[in-house]
Image (cartoon, helix red, strand yellow):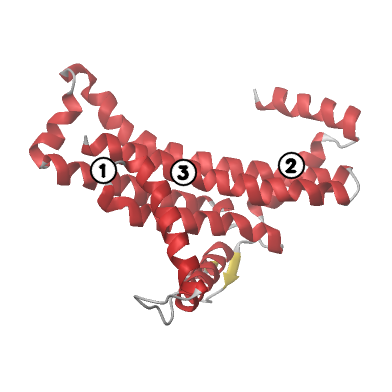
Amino acid sequence: MMNRVFQTLNIFFERVMGIGCMDIGGLLKELLLEDKVAIHFDFMNGFFDINRSIVISWVIILVLILFMLFITSNMKVHNISKKQLIAELIVEKLRGITYGMLGEEGLRYRDYMVVVLVFIGASNLVGLFGQTPPTMDLNVTASLSLMSIILVEAAGIRKKGMKKWVKSFAEPMAVVAPMNVLELAIRPLSLCMRLFGNIIGATVIMELLKMAVPVFIPAAFSLYFDLFDGLIQAYVFVFLTSLYIKEAVE
């Protein structure tokens, strides 16, 4: 099956763009198997090495914290500044987005979803600055997905209680219980692979465009893949997580 896919890609890119399948395979290998270690510890055969995706994530978190400290400094109750007005508008809009997804029952989880939305969105935007998005690392997307599903199930337990939560796996009939249990593994895998796949796919397309066409065309497409598509993927991840929470607390 994969051979057929690569053969089809080979024919298309050779005829349309003059790029061979070996170039595509080499590009994927370079993107997925590049040296990801940023900080190496010569101890226990690299067990404590720190990947580039983690370092970039730390930088993103630091930048977001500094921005929040700046925009929320000197806040007042009356005669507020333009800076405070912008800060309140940002918070109101972001909370409004997640509230629309979660509804009244999931209101207590909206701030967490705002944090996830901002972090993934910012992570996907670092490609505009020539950096590799942390979401191109499967470890990062898997961690985000696992955290989300733990929150979903915790929300269900909090709402229903442990006994009713366990019984919910046998609804509407006991025969579907194995499928409902299996869904616990399918949901984080789906969230993880959807985010990772879309980001790696956009990166591959951009690299192929750089190989095949003049530089101004990839620059135009970069605005879409790094800006619009990156924010859309952050929204989709949060939307699906919020949908799962909404189902869990109903």
Q: x, y percentage for residue 233?
A: 54, 44
Work out whether residue 127 can be spotted.
Answer: yes
Mark 3 packing: few (<14 Cα in 10 Å), some, or many (20+)? many
Up/down of 179 relative to 50, above or below: above
Foreground label between 1 and 2: 1
Mark 2 residue type: Ile
- Tag 1 or tag 3, which sits nearer the N-term? 1
Mark 3 residue type: Phe
Separation of residues labelled 1 and 2 (CA atoms) = 40 Å
- Tag 3 or tag 2, which sits nearer the N-term? 2
Q: Does residue 128 appear left or right of residue 16 in this picture?
A: left
Separation of residues labelled 3 and 1 (CA atoms) = 20 Å
Up/down of 113 relative to 164, above or below: below
For label 1, the SS is: loop
Residue 229: image quadrant is top right
Residue occupying image coordinates x 28% and y 24%? 179
Residue occupying image coordinates x 84% and y 25%? 11
Mark 1 residue type: Glu
Residue occupying image coordinates x 71% and y 44%? 204
